[in-house]
Image: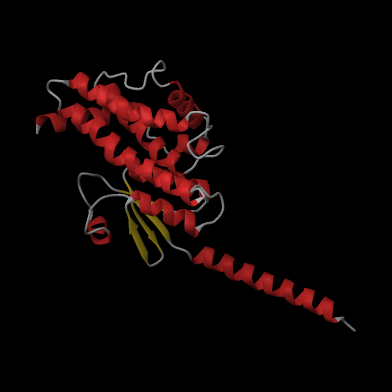
Amino acid sequence: MISLYDFYILNEKLKNKLRTEEFDKRKRDECLKLLGFWISPFSRRVEMALKFKGVPYEYLEEDLPKKTPLLLELNPIHKKVPVLVHNDKILSESHVILEYIDLTWSNNPFLPQDPYEKAMARFWAKFVDEQILPLGFMSLVKAETGIEVAIEETRELITYLEKEVTGKYYFGGKTIGFLDMVAGSMIPFCLARAWECMGIDMITHEKFPELNRWINKLNEVEIVRECIPPKEKHIERMNQIVERIKST
């Protein structure tokens, strides 16, 4: 006759098995699609996050500035990539999508667990996209005179990131985190290649030794390399964008 204890253990094993089977079924039935654009740092960082989580997804390439009916249907407010479709849920804005991914798939977390550190990661991510990007790209492209002033102002902003990463492997600590995905998709690849197009050596080793060390560390990570556009093709496209902006 089976003891009460053995019955309890068998019952728990059965429940765990059923929960695992149900979880696996939900995983098989999940629909996950990402609308992106190969040159966009905003969609590239989302791809980076999905790959870090090991989540299978379908990638749908947009050909911006043209916009497909699907993009306009899924993101009628901003009409931009990235857009993540998870079953019946539709999300836009890369920071929002990154947080959703981290909360939905708990393995390999990349947002800090500490509330203060999480808030600061969000702060610096917004700083990259809302301060460094406009000044470090649009202002430089449009500057007919006084470009040296714009370069120095951009470097002043980048200095904050230099201080933030000093003494760390990555912004996220010993592993790549939320801010590494945001800044890593933007500064060393997107902006650096735009600066190369304009003949600007923005992040010199002399001024930014810690950022250059961080960039080298990023380049060692296979998933990061997979999410970075081919350099020659990227620079060619950036040249076209720069010329188009100057001509308007």
| Number of marks | 0
The image quadrant where one finds the N terminus is bottom right
Q: Residue furthest left?
A: 248
The quadrant where residue 45 appears: top left
Q: Position of residue 93 (x, y in %)?
A: 32, 52
Residue depicted at 32% across the width and 21% down the height = 202
Q: Position of residue 186 (x, y in %)?
A: 35, 36
Q: Position of residue 71 (x, y in %)?
A: 26, 55
Q: Position of residue 80 (x, y in %)?
A: 25, 50
Residue nearer the viewer, 212 or 39: 212
Which colour style is shown? secondary structure
The image quadrant where one finds the C terminus is top left
Q: Is residue 109 above or below residue 28?
A: above
Q: Residue furthest top?
A: 206
Left or right? Give the position of 137 relative to 54: left
Residue nearer the viewer, 248 or 127: 127
Q: Is residue 71 above or below residue 163?
A: below
Residue 142 appears anywhere in the view = yes
Residue 40 appears anywhere in the view = no
Residue nearer the viewer, 62 or 117: 117
Q: Is residue 172 above or below residue 3?
A: above
Q: Residue furthest bottom?
A: 1
Q: Residue furthest right?
A: 1
Residue depicted at 36% across the width and 22% down the height = 203
Q: Is residue 159 above or below residue 183?
A: above
Residue depicted at 28% across the width and 48% down the height = 62
The quadrant where residue 236 appears: top left
